[in-house]
Amino acid sequence: MNAASFPSPSATARAAGPAAGAPAISAAGLRKEFTVKRRAGRVRRTSHTVAAVAGVDLAVGHGETIGYIGPNGAGKSTTLKMMTGVLAPSGGELRVCGLEPVPRRKQLARRVGVVFGQRSQLWWDLPLHESFRLLRYVYAVPEAEHARRLAACRELLDLGAFWDTPVRQLSLGQRMRGEITAALLHGPGVLFLDEPTIGLDVVSKQALRSFLAELGARGDVTIVLTTHDLADIERLCPRLVVVDHGRVVHDGTLAALHDRYGSRRRVVADLDRPYDELPHVPGAKVERVEDDGHRVVFALDGVPAGGLIGRLAQLGGLRDVAVQEPDIEEVVARLYAQSP
Amino acid sequence: MAEPARGAYRELVRAQIRSQSQYRASFAMDAALTSCVSVLEILAILVLFRVTPSLGGFSVREAVLIAALCEFAFQIADLAVGNIERIAEYVRTGRMDTVLVRPLSPLGQLLAGDFPLRKAGRVVQGLALYAAALVYAGIDWTPARALLAVTAPVAAGALFAAAFVAGATVAFFWIDSGEFANAFTYGGRTFGTYPQTIYPAWMRVLFGYGFAGYQPALALLGRPDPLGTPAWVAWCTPLAAAAAWVGAVLMWRTGVRHYRSTGS
């Protein structure tokens, strides 16, 4: 990929923050409450206030890529919708590109790009390239700037093959590449991606991830990604914000998350014949024995795998050995289960 | 930013027209079938006069003018903003999200993005009926009346358009609101088609549609209002439309703020 031709943010987006060094996104005590009516008797209905977002504090620096994850109903999408000016917060402070999203919705819209995985922003009945042409008018992008970014996306996301195809006939993977292009054509400084890989096949997911990884690595676009696919996070997000019940329950690197929740590396040993007696190595615990004793799985308690593997080699009969990194799915599942 | 924004709405309308032309057969069928409605409205008036020589004190020629003016105005409004009723679908499915993340007004985007070209035929037909009614009514033409004849359908159209927008706003508060809004738009059109003298006072107050056909027609015909409103009121349709729009836009803004979106 040619890094120089990447779709770069517009001058407006770059000059976004009122003060230099101000974060791209800052939230303090951000809340969103919904009133839910429930039937209480034949006619009477009672109102309940439900806090979808219950006090989120967050600062995202320019050029950062963060993964915003949490179980269904944790308040991820609601937070994203507040950040893009779609929903008005019920309380707290929120600034995106230095702007208060709802009152400055139109100005903000020029500086951020949004991809809703489950909702198309393209013109359903028109050829794909028509949507891109229309967006130039919608965002009032200078023609040369628009053409440059479009050419970059066309090449990097390989849009040529379905350039003239009506959007309704595109595969999900093709459409999603179109959606990402649509979100980048006005050169946003912040890109919000709400479950961009949902429903995609493995190849499409990987293509999309490598594009986003490249975009994130350039460091001039801030990316906020919500996803249920933790492989997205592993590939793209050095920083992970986990929300549950409307609150941030973890904010840090993936490694910090593993440390905190004691997730362990594993050594999987395949044997020619089962051990008569399972070996004891300090810091390594036998987690399970499979395949009639032909496979033994050890969990490492923070010790290097070398000692254990050396010991197994001494014992003989070792056919194959694999070291498994901690499984993020498992950590996150444990995290969700823990929070009240 | 006014200039680029206008360009954007123009392009959105063009895109919508191109989208619709993707479904040519359905487009043609729809345009052909729905263009009969205005004729039927007028025929209904003529049928009434087979059993009565006058309706609420108005002759057949006068009543037809009221009906034709109201019908033409309604068709203008329906073409320009009638598709705003699709807002219910946008709110229900959460598609409104994608409207709100663009740097344009939501109302402008919805109107431009759903512009129903297929309704254009009805406006042409409404115009033809109105022109015929003006001739048939035997108006004593003055410059002021000529001006009124041209402006009245536009002003009355704006009045109906405001009703469409206000009615559509209900969707933000009450998801399944289609029929409720129709009572004030399609209902208002039927209400405005007849001389207001046939209605009890509370109905005339509840629906302000006397301004759509009845009042301007009085001024065109040079008739005092049998209900006793002063003669100058008959010229006030533009004011009524402006007031209705202020209300409609305020309601719309409240509605957008009230938008709750849907789960992811």
Image (tube, coloured by chain):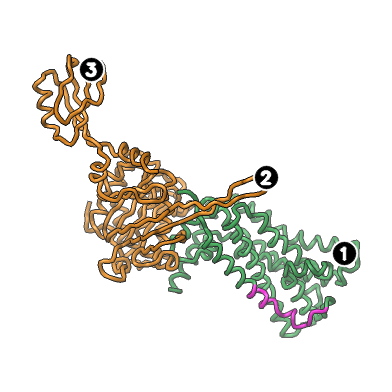
Disc 2 target residue: A42
Which residue sits at x=26%, y=44%? Answer: A257
Disc 3 target residue: A293
**Circles 2 and 1: CB atoms closer than 8 Å:** no
Q: Secondary structure at mark 3?
A: helix
Q: Secondary structure at mark 2?
A: loop
Label 3 marks which chain's residue? A
Q: Chain letter for orange?
A: A
Which residue sits at x=65%, y=73%? Answer: B241
Q: Quadrant of the C terminus of chain A?
A: top left
Which residue sits at x=11%, y=19%? Answer: A316
Q: In this rendering, does residue A115 appear at all?
A: yes
Residue type (three-letter) at the residue carrying disc 3? Gly
Between B262 and B124, the one lying in front of the other is B262
Judged from this view, the residue extending furthest toward the bottom is B143
Residue type (three-letter) at the residue carrying disc 2? Arg
Disc 1 target residue: B49
What is the span of residues highlighted in magenta in the rendered image?
Answer: B228-243
Q: Colour of chain B?
A: green
Question: How far apart in space, not on screen, are marks 2 and 1 (Cα)?
Answer: 49 Å
The reply, left or right, for residue A40 in relation to residue A22 is right
The vertical placement of B208 against A161, above or below, is below
Name the spot of residue B197 as percent of width and height, x first. Answer: 83, 70
- Same chain for the residues under marks 1 and 3 in the image: no
**Circles 2 and 3: CB atoms closer than 8 Å:** no
Judged from this view, the residue extending furthest toward the front is A340
> Is A209 one of the magenta-colored residues?
no
Name the spot of residue A312 as percent of width and height, x first. Answer: 12, 23
